[in-house]
Amino acid sequence: MPDFRVYCQPPEREPSEIRPSADESHHLVAVNRAKSGDTVVAFDGRGNEWICELIEDAKHAAVLKVRFRQKIKPLPYEITLGQALPKGQFMDAIVRKATELGAARIAPLESDRTIVRLEGDRTDRKIEKWQTAAVEAAKQCGNPFVPEILPVQSASAFMEASRGYDLKLIASLQPGAKSLKSVLPAFAAANGRAPCKVLWLVGPEGDFTPAELSLARAMGFEPITLGPLVLRCETAAVYALSVLSYELQSAGS
């Protein structure tokens, strides 16, 4: 795979040239130091890639000549991460790691124990920032699909509206939580296949409240243990997605 990637959304399906935005051009030419004649992959975050040649290496107005387009097949499974908002900048890191691990969408949630509260314009700015972080991560890791960042909403409302998933999981510190290795084979035995659409909720510092966990169980979520140690929420998100992705890949191979 070529080293140079730019994110863009061409106005037509089969463009002969692509002109990245000023920011993307700057990152390509000034930061990554691409030169005329270099191969560049332009991608739209929805599985379309255009293999291009850089023909104008202007720092704020690069021009790419399209050689051919290719459509990348999505993963055979789709993971949605419902993440209770952590403190500080940890959500940025979670978005980046979730993109690297192939999450299809990320739902930022305000739970009863969430310290961070977003309102009005601040919410819009945060979502825009997280979407930018997802694009940057996709460029870096070569993921042709950029996860969708859903609007910030309450964890309870999100749980109550969670429909259309084959399997719904929630990371839990409570006694009786099952291991993923026991839940996935049970699903396969009951349905004759591995789950295709999976939702996984990860709580904030201090975990979800007993009331939230009770609601999750009522909404069909399966409590899953992430091991004997108490993980930070950003570690828990990466751990949960890593293990789930590995198991779903193994089930589909």
Image (cartoon, rainbow, N blue to C red):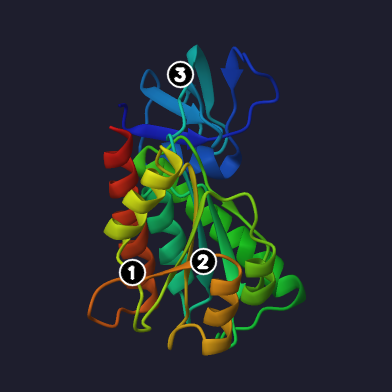
Q: What element carries label 3?
A: strand
Q: Is mark 1 on a helix, strand or loop?
A: loop
Residue 49: x and y in percent read: 49, 24
How far, Cα to Cα, is label 1 from label 3? Answer: 48 Å
Image height of 98 relative to 115, above or below: above
Numbered label attached to residue 52:
3
Q: What residue type is labelled 3?
A: Cys
- Residue 113 visible in the shown view: no
How far, Cα to Cα, is label 2 from label 1? Answer: 12 Å
Q: What element carries label 2?
A: loop
Q: Which sits in the foreground, 28 or 126?
A: 126
Q: What residue type is labelled 2?
A: Phe
Q: How crowded is mark 1: few (under 14 residues within 10 Å), some or many (20 or more)?
A: some
Residue 253: x and y in percent read: 28, 32
Looking at the rendering, in which quadrant would you find the N terminus? top left
Q: Which residue lies furthest to the left in this view?
A: 228
Q: What residue type is labelled 1?
A: Lys
Numbered label attached to residue 221:
2
- Residue at which label 1 appears: 178
If you read the primary sequence from the N terminus, does the residue marked by circle 3 or circle 2 appear first?
Answer: 3
Residue at image position (54%, 73%) is 217
Q: Which residue lies furthest to the right in this view?
A: 120
If you read the primary sequence from the N terminus, does the residue marked by circle 1 or circle 3 appear first?
Answer: 3
Q: Which sits in the foreground, 46 or 179?
A: 179
If you read the primary sequence from the N terminus, does the residue marked by circle 2 or circle 1 appear first?
Answer: 1
Q: Residues within 10 Å of mark 3 (few under 14, many from 20)?
A: many
Of tags 3 and 2, which is closer to the observer?
2
Relative placement, left or right, of 101 versus 145 is: left
Q: Which sits in the foreground, 200 or 61?
A: 200
Residue 232: x and y in percent read: 34, 79
